[in-house]
Image (cartoon, coloured by chain):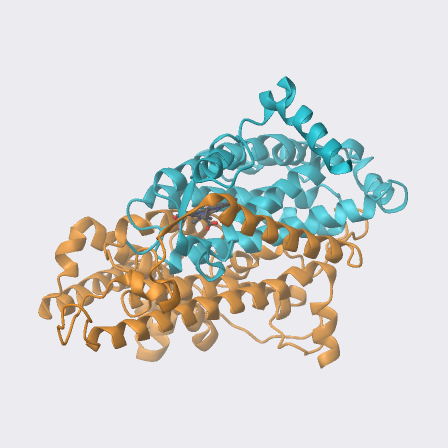
Chain colours: A orange, B cyan
Amino acid sequence: MWHNIWIIASKPDNIPIVGMLVLVLFFGFLSFWLAFKNDRIRRAAAVRPKPESGKAKRDAVDVIDIMYPESEQGLPKKVSCWPHLVKLEFICAIAVMALLMFWSIPIDAPLEEPSDPTLTPNPSKAPWYFLGLQDMLVYFDPWIAGVLLPTFIIVGLMVIPYIDVNPKGNGYYTFAERPFAILTYWFGFFVLWVLEIVIGTFCRGPGWMFFWPGQEWDPHRVVAEVNINWNEFLANITGVTTLKTETAGLLLGIITILTYFGLGMLIPYLWLKKRSAPIIDQLGLIRYSVVGFFFWTMMALSIKIVLRLAFSIKYILVTPWFNI
Amino acid sequence: MLTEQKEKIKDIVTKSQVYKSIFRRGFGDTPRNRALAILGNVFLHLHPPYVMRHALKFTHSWCMGGITFLLFIVLCFTGVFLCFYYHPDKINAYRDMKYFEYDVPFGVVLRNMHRWAAHLMVITVWLHMTRVFMTGAYKPPREFNWAVGVILLVLTLLLSFTGYLLPDDQLGFWAVTVGTNMARATPLLGHEGPFGEQLGATAYNDIRFALLGGSVVGGNALLRAYVWHCVAMPVTAIIFLAVHFWRTRKDGGTAGPL
Ligand code: HEM
């Protein structure tokens, strides 16, 4: 079993994926560690009496206090770029160049057989950084996985600064002050993007079938899989056979999607209103809807994955022109 | 005696018209000279003369933006040398890879460095984005720079993707085939996408055809990938990089607690 994992992991073109996972985990833990550390210091400082004023409690602590150890706090905030920054950049550049060169001498870039349109490899895989999207092809039609989702990712990333109205946490690591933003980011980046790449690399074998790491990639494995659509699924569990018709499928699909987004927008709204959270007024209608749309679209991906894996559901909405 | 002569030579050099026309500052460690070192140099003046102390911490910025930029430079540099030997046509492309392997001096290392730096750059862009997110550095006034960054992210991925095809081996060929097959399904513009057929899209006039210069990944696709990869996209990336750095400076440098 380890042998199989090793074969896949040490293929020259898969080395970057192993490297990526290590780097993402390292820097991910680093950023959370820094965030929690800052939060801890702030909480402690919030109850520590401020020396000069003698106030027993202060809630707003200078963030700057956090950034520097005691020994550095009296020093000027600004330093000259030459040599302080330039020196660091230089050292960093040398380290990266050394790494790259030593890496490039023993480990050869992959080069396979000459291209041959008549010889389709099984599985054929996209470049590793797009494997998450390719894996989405299992759950969505190509126009969604290959066109719509990338567009949503790009637009969704771009709107982040315009929909995140929380002024806190600007310029320093913190978790306590923006938990929703950070959790959403890591769900999208790590679970949906990075882990999907890892699955696409290590778990997708011939015919894009799922294999556990270490399992033999047997191209003749038969997967008994009968996928059904959402309306058929409902018809089966309720016993109402009229739901199986095309029109019912169309209507049911539209209703399901509208209800999903409708409730997704409404429930948090009511919940926040009830707690009279100021965020509702800060966001305004447009921002709130944009947040809701992107958030619930992202969640829909994972919901669809679960529906497929648990209940073999293929499409939620079936129309003559496209299916979702 | 010797030191005296050394001093004399140093004097002659540093006081010559040629030297003074190039280097316009003295060596004294004064605040003025430190600032001039940055301001008087077109490359270094991407920096402000002074930076916030926190920006120096490795744990703050991870140096990731800088590392990404360094890798971009490495890629431009090694890329130019690869271009000296590479022919973007179906007959020569794969042979040139073998040529790198067996004939071109340092050809293997050259190609390896280009390939690994490209992969690494994809990873460091993601990490840079993650650090910017985790420090909240996209918040006002840096919203626009984040958007420019997203474009750079897309360009980085597309640069890597177009380069994938160039060796013309099975790996690149099928990866690009899988990738561009998705374009068939573009709504309205692809012949297998929603409403594509109704609008008259066929395999010979849709968006995939435009990308590949044909209905299959062939010689035309190779040429197009080459031109995108070696000319159009690097130039676009450089323009956006200029905007990115400019905005980083104008928005007050690396975001920090104020
Ligand atoms: C080719 C890719 C890129 C290069 C070469 C690059 C380079 C840099 C550099 C050198 C800095 C200075 C601070 C630092 O090193 O962290 C910076 C800052 C910044 N970058 Fe990028 N970047 C790239 C992509 C991106 C992406 C993908 C994003 C976000 C989606 C982004 C958003 C930002 C923002 C908002 C800042 C200001 C950060 C601050 O003030 O703390 N950049 N970039």
Q: Is residue A301 visible?
A: no
The location of residue A294, given as percent across then percent down, is 32, 56
The location of residue A310, given as percent across then percent down, is 45, 77
The location of residue B186, given as percent across then percent down, is 48, 43
Q: Is the residue A137 above or below the residue B194 in the image?
A: below
Q: Is residue B23 left or right of residue A64?
A: right
Report the number of numbered marks: 0
Q: Is residue B111 left or right of residue B76?
A: right
Quarter of the image for residue A122 reads bottom right
Q: Is residue B76 visible?
A: yes
Q: Residue furthest top?
A: B17
Question: Which residue corresponds to the image point at 69% horizontal and 57% vertical from the top-left?
Answer: A99
Question: Which residue corresponds to the image point at 51% horizontal and 54% vertical from the top-left?
Answer: B63
Relative depth, front residue between B46 and A182 = B46
Q: Residue furthest front?
A: B1
Quarter of the image for residue A212 reads bottom right
Relative depth, front residue between B97 and A33 = A33
Relative depth, front residue between B65 and A20 = B65
Question: Which residue corresponds to the image point at 31% horizontal and 73% vertical from the top-left?
Answer: A41
Q: Is the residue A241 above or below the residue A296 in the image?
A: below
Q: Is the residue A195 above or below the residue B91 in the image?
A: below
Q: Residue furthest right?
A: B103
Q: Is the residue A254 above or below the residue B230 in the image?
A: below
Quarter of the picture containing the C terminus of chain B is: bottom left
The location of residue A116, given as percent across then percent down, is 78, 47
Question: Which residue corresponds to the image point at 24% horizontal and 55% vertical from the top-left?
Answer: A167
Quarter of the picture containing the N terminus of chain B is: top right
Relative depth, front residue between B184 and B251 = B251
